[in-house]
Amino acid sequence: NAGVTQTPKFRILKIGQSMTLQCTQDMNHNYMYWYRQDPGMGLKLIYYSVGAGITDKGEVPNGYNVSRSTTEDFPLRLELAAPSQTSVYFCASSPRGSAGLRIKTSGGTDTQYFGPGTRLTVL
Amino acid sequence: AQSVTQLGSHVSVSEGALVLLRCNYSSSVPPYLFWYVQYPNQGLQLLLKYTTGATLVKGINGFEAEFKKSETSFHLTKPSAHMSDAAEYFCAVSKRDFNKFYFGSGTKLNVKP
């Protein structure tokens, strides 16, 4: 298994440009997540998905969009890049037994598996 | 609302010394608790997690953490630091009925020879 892969590793954008950060997982995980990591701020959840066709906003969704047409892929779209979006972006996935925004756990929750990150600079 | 506080953005210890990284959480109900480690230019890796059962949890690389409900804490410890432990460590919480994670701001561990 390759696990969670992200492309590109690095990217420099000009203000107002758009781009898509790619994320793919080959573990058949239902849940996928996008985080941004700013220095000294930890990780902030941008968007997440509980299964193909289902997405929802996290803590900091403004300026981003996502889609989830397949279980494997969860791309993150920046439509009008701004300097405030300079950050390191991490995609993660987690195995779950059922879809839905609220699910009953059977006594435990599941680990998140992280990709290597995409370092984005907006100038 | 969930929140996680990690005391000390930087911690420095000597090789062989005790490692103690602090994490406190606020939650209306007992959450699930995690510690992740991040090496430079890499993603996060799970060190250990607490869901139910024994409150002292052992993880990889000799780390362990104890869930203390009365103190709303989940501090990470290792009896003897190794140079390879130098990294950034993140505490995270998740609600029991909703697979959404909240991360602390991280603690960078420096290990001196």
Image (cartoon, coloured by chain):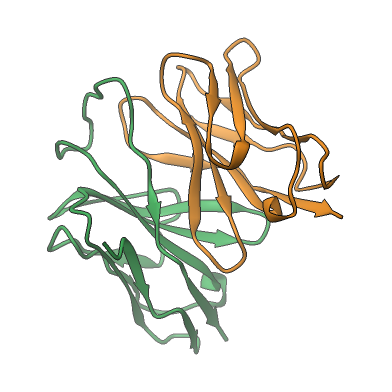
Where in the figure is residue A58, as x and y percent of width and height?
A: 38, 49
Residue under the image location 36 percent in, 66 percent down: A64
Q: Position of residue B21 (x, y in %)?
A: 71, 36
- Farthest top residue? B70
Please provide percent x and percent y for residue A110: 33, 37
- Give the quarter of the figure containing the C terminus of chain A: bottom right
Q: Quadrant of the N terminus of chain A?
A: bottom left
In the picture shown, does residue B73 fall above or below A21?
above
| Residue B75, image x, y percentages | 66, 28
Which residue is pictured at 25% across the width and 43% down the height? A95
Chain given the colour orange: B
Of residues A111 and B63, the one drawn nearer to the viewer in this rendering: B63
Quarter of image, res B113: bottom right
For the point 13% across and 62% down, the residue is A70
For the image, the number of numbered tags is 0
Colour of chain A, in one word, is green
Left or right of B100: which side holds A55? left
Q: Vertical placement of A119 versus A64: above or below? A: below
Instruction: Give the side of residue A88 with respect to residue A98, left or right.
Output: right
Q: In this view, does A63 lie to the left or right of B26?
A: left
Camera-nearest residue between B75 and B111: B111
- Picture residue at 55% right of the left edge, 73% below the top: A86
Above or below: residue A6 compared with residue B53: below
